[in-house]
Amino acid sequence: METRLAGQELAFEGERDDDEAYAPVHYLADEADEPYRVLEAVESERVRTEGLQKALATLDPRSRRIVEARWLREKDAATLHDLAAEFKVSAERIRQIEAKALDKMRKLLPAPA
């Protein structure tokens, strides 16, 4: 026991920011990689995706087009003015349609865990 207590102290997180520096914290398992966490994340994503598809299916074609163009594009999301020109209505009307559609979808989507 005295040998252990007399040994050199080592910081848990290491003394340097180098990736190569030895620190005990580097040897701990990441909780995000636990199998149950991975499965939980996959299942949660599946439920959200299915819920989103069901919620979108309840919208009329115009509302669905607006929501998809404004919120579901990876790049180049449409502006209110772009959609107003497409549907030949005011940007304010597009905003109203969007708000009503999003509210309807929120009611149908499962609550986040």
Image: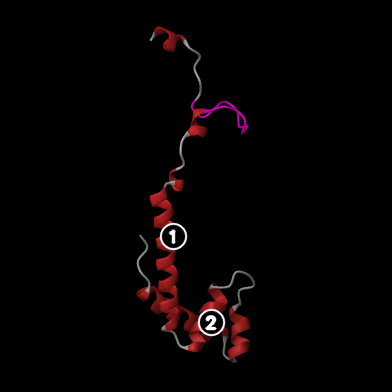
Using the numbered discs, state the Cα–Cα distance from disc 2 to disc 1 in whole angstroms. Answer: 28 Å
Q: Amino acid at mark 1?
A: Val
Looking at the image, is 46 positioned above or below residue 103? Answer: above
Q: Nearer the viewer, residue 76 or 53?
A: 53
Horizontal relation, residue 72 to residue 29: left or right: right
Q: Position of residue 78 (x, y in %)?
A: 61, 77
Residue 66: mark in rendering: 2
Question: Element under label 2?
Answer: helix
Tell whether position 96 is magenta. no
Q: Position of residue 85 (x, y in %)?
A: 63, 88
Q: How is the image coloured?
A: secondary structure
Residue 24: mark in rendering: none
Looking at the image, is 46 positioned above or below residue 95? Answer: above
Residue located 46% across and 42% down the image: 30
Return the residue at label 1: 42
Q: Nearer the viewer, residue 21 or 85?
A: 21
Query: Which residue is situated farthest in the bottom direction here?
Result: 88
Q: Nearer the viewer, residue 71 or 18?
A: 18
